Image: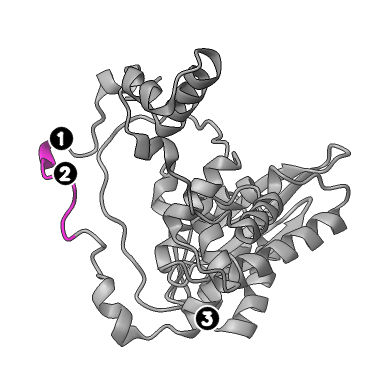
Amino acid sequence: MVAPAAQRDAVAYLESTHKMSERRACQVIGCCRMTIRYASRRSDDAVVRERMKAMAHERRRFGYRRLHVLLRREGHVVNHKRLFRLYREENLNVRRRGGRKRAIGTRSPMLLPMAPNERWSLDFVSDQLTDGRRLRILCVVDDCTRECLALVADTSLSGGRVARELDQIIAQRGKPKMIVSDNGTEFTSNAILTWADRSRVDWHYIAPGKPNQNAFVESFNGRLRDELLNETLFGSLAHARAALQAWQSDYNTQRPHSRIGWLTPAEYASNFTPRRDLALRSMRSSAPVTAAHDTANFGKTNRRSELKRG
């Protein structure tokens, strides 16, 4: 099937080269004269197009859906399908970064927290400065509201430093019921064990080699690395701390989150009501039962698929 634009070009070619009339040219290529004479009345959307390009240049890892939310906040009335067309015409597609292949195994649903401060997740992210020095970042996330509670950057972070940072967060926000982390040496140190016993906070360690059990902070780490760490060169530790603080504020107050109805984490936390959100959340999980029912093969992986996927 030939597009209308190509049909118009063919008719114009026959008229100019072979001196055919419009009627005769349409008969030759088999198209309707109404198609040739049609003049588009579609607006150019110059204002929306330029603002979208500016936003995409400022936030290079945002797709058209998040740009659509930001444009609506500014008062631009545009359909998401029209915005997607403009997005593709300007060639603003986000380039996908390749990820490592993972073996396929059984999966069980993850419990969802029912209220803010019910569960926090902790993890470390590594990067380096332009002079080659290593940089470690402590990430603290509220699993219910998706808020980033802290981004602590330093060349070295001990268990005692983690405990002091948690005390500062608790002084401002309140104490969580549970904290989830991996089995890193900082989280299993005597300083953290003493802190958890003194603060009476239930500290849960995920199974070794199972980062999917700490999925909330792992997803946050991916956004942090994709939108900031991979896009910025840090000349000094002070520069890294300032950039992380600005990105944390933008993440909590400006960046729309797809899993909470395209609200920002701060908006979701301020409007959170257990009565409204209780029907959307389940203590068991978002899935009523586990995806795999065969208990005999639970925990086994498909070796053939594992070999195929590398």
Q: How is the image coloured?
A: one colour
**Residue type pointed to by label 1:** Asn
Question: In the rendering, at what x and y percent does residue 249 appear?
Answer: 67, 69
- Which numbered disc covers residue 292? 2
Residue denoted by label 3 = 175
Question: In the rendering, at what x and y percent does residue 4 appear?
Answer: 41, 33
**Highlighted range, magenta:** 288-297
Q: Is residue 59 left or right of residue 280?
A: right
* SS type, badge 1: helix
In the rendered structure, which disc, 3 or 1, sits on the residue that comes first in sequence?
A: 3
Q: Nearer the viewer, residue 217 or 48?
A: 48
Residue 45 at least partly seen: yes
Give the residue at x 41% y 44%: 210
* SS type, badge 3: loop
Mark 3 neighbour density, 10 Å: few (under 14) some (14–19) many (20 or more): some
In the rendered structure, which disc, 2 or 3, sits on the residue that comes first in sequence?
A: 3
Question: In the rendering, at what x and y percent does residue 41 appear?
Answer: 49, 54
Give the residue at x 59% y 39%: 91
Q: How many marks?
A: 3
* SS type, badge 2: loop
Residue denoted by label 1 = 297
The residues bearing labels 2 and 3 have C-alpha atoms spaced at a distance of 36 Å
In the rendered structure, which disc, 1 or 2, sits on the residue that comes first in sequence?
A: 2
Give the residue at x 55% y 84%: 174
Question: In the rendering, at what x and y percent does residue 161 appear?
Answer: 71, 64
**Residue type pointed to by label 3:** Lys
